[in-house]
Amino acid sequence: MDVGAVVRGDAKTCASCGRTFEWRKKWARDWEHVRYCSRRCRSRGVRQKDEDLERAVLELLAARAGGSTICPSEAARRVRPEAWRGLMEDARAAGRRLAARGRVRFLQKGREVDPSRARGPIRLGRGPEFGF
């Protein structure tokens, strides 16, 4: 692939952490194959607990009324009740991955926010592609 063919404004979503990342010159030759935003995410990948957290988020939202939201801690508690605090960042990452697919929405103070930039307390609600 020609380096000039890559549009510098291209953005992708990391398969591991769910954050959005931009094209970088070092990826010019294989941008179409890049799936992770960093070495850490590439080495970590998506583990079974990550899939369990995604499933827990979807199940919790499906069990509630259409406009209801959940806190990522609820999914973490469902997956690992005795050590849920250690799963909080993983639960947020699961929410970001689901948000990238349109299955959930990231909310702060009732407003939708960019999952890659959200800081502080968040809630997860059903997205346009929820379909559980």
Image: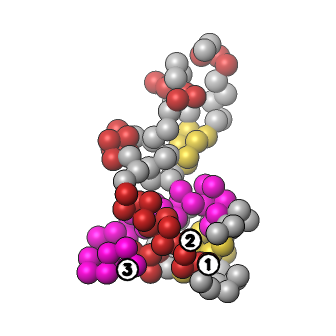
Separation of residues labelled 3 and 2 (CA atoms):
14 Å
Q: Main secondary structure of the magenta part?
A: helix
Of 60 and 20, the residue lying toward us: 60
For the rendered model, the colour scheme is secondary structure
Q: Which residue is rendered at x = 50% and y = 67% of the image?
A: 55
Residue at the spot of label 1? 62
Q: Is residue 91 magenta?
A: yes
Q: Is residue 10 above or below residue 89?
A: above
Query: What label does residue 116 carry, if any?
Result: none
Q: Which residue is rendered at x = 52% and y = 29% of the image?
A: 33
Query: What label does residue 77 carry, if any?
Result: 3
Q: Is residue 82 above or below residue 14?
A: below
Separation of residues labelled 2 and 1 (CA atoms):
6 Å
**In this orientation, does residue 17 appear?**
yes
Q: Which residue is rendered at x = 37% and y = 73% of the image?
A: 79
Query: What label does residue 58 carry, if any?
Result: 2
- Mark in front: 3 vs 1: 1
Check contact, mark 2 vs mark 1: CB within 8 A. yes
Q: Is residue 127 above or below residue 63?
A: above
Q: Is residue 32 magenta?
A: no
Q: Earlier in the sequence, mark 3 or mark 1?
A: 1
The boundaries of the magenta stretch are 77-105
